[in-house]
Image (spheres, rainbow, N blue to C red):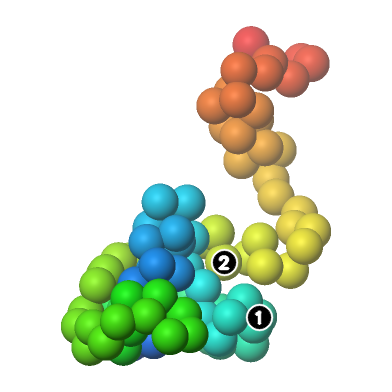
Amino acid sequence: MSAAPRFWIGVASRDHVRRGVAGGFCQLGHGKAAPIRRLAPGDWIAYYSPRESYPDGALLQAFTAIGEVSWGAAFRRGLVEVTADDFAHIAAAMGVTLPGRA
């Protein structure tokens, strides 16, 4: 049984939020790992942006993105072991066929 999702508000300038949305990742605390470690797959995060850009952009004070957290937060650790099936899926998406797999 999976844990119930948690709901978070992240605070970041809109330009940082847009970079994350475009790249399919979230960032908090200027790249600090501790806040990201608190997120779990299935959690939801909404971003509040006090400014357009960091540190001195125009005042914005608005919610600028919302989304569900996937397992990708694990990549903040630098090296992550995955299953052979997950690796094969990644390889296939990159156009690579692994030996022994059709």
87 and 32: which one is in front? 32
The residue pinned by badge 2 equals 73
**In the image, what residue occupies the spot 57% across and 66% down?**
73
Q: Quadrant of residue 64?
A: bottom left
Residue 19: where, in percent of width, then height?
44, 59
2 or 1: tag closer to the N-terminus? 1
Residue 48 visible in the displayed image: no
The mark lying in front, picked from 2 and 1, is 1
Q: Quadrant of residue 15?
A: bottom left
- Secondary structure found at label 2: helix
**In this view, which residue lies farthest toward the top?**
102
Q: Label 1 crowding class (10 Å Cα cut-off): few <14, some 14-19, many 20+?
A: some
Residue 63: where, in percent of width, then height?
21, 79
Residue 48: where, in percent of width, then height?
29, 84
The residue pinned by badge 1 equals 33
Q: How many marks?
A: 2
32 and 43: which one is in front? 32
- Secondary structure found at label 1: helix
**In this view, which residue lies farthest toward the left?**
62
Three-letter residue code for mark 2 = Ala
Q: Is residue 90 above or below residue 78?
A: above
**In the image, what residue occupies the spot 27% across and 69% down?**
65
